[in-house]
Amino acid sequence: MGTVESLIGELKIKIISTLGLMDVTPEDIGDDDQLVGGDTGIDSIDVLELVMMIEKDYGIKIENKELGAKVFASVRTLAEFIAEKRQK
């Protein structure tokens, strides 16, 4: 499970830099905390930026809103989604 754990750390840094979250550190984002609409203040416009970052950095497309809602539930669900797609 090390890959998901390392992806979680990597994603936190990418989320912060992609969205320019000045006062947020990776430690501020809980692995299982609600990502969108949670304490980080990430909203649907931010999600679009994250979708583009994931497509660019990982070559993985998030095809629709329903999938996006599931994938962006938390950093862990996002990392698990990316790890799963990479294996295929």
Image: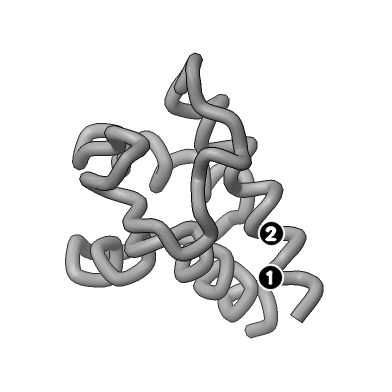
The quarter of the picture where residue 6 lies is bottom right
Q: Name the mark on residue 4.
A: 1
Q: Nearer the viewer, residue 19 or 30?
A: 30
Q: Secondary structure at mark 2?
A: helix
Q: Nearer the viewer, residue 72 or 37?
A: 37
Circle 2 sits on which residue?
7
**How far is mark 1 from mark 2, CA to CA?**
5 Å
x%, y% of residue 69? 24, 64
- Is 53 above or below relative to 22? below
Colour style of the rendered protein structure: one colour
Q: Secondary structure at mark 1?
A: helix
Residue type, numbered disc 2: Leu
Left or right: 9 in relation to 55: right
The quarter of the picture where residue 17 lies is top right
Q: Which quadrant holds the C terminus?
A: bottom right
x%, y% of residue 21? 46, 22
- Is 14 above or below relative to 73? above
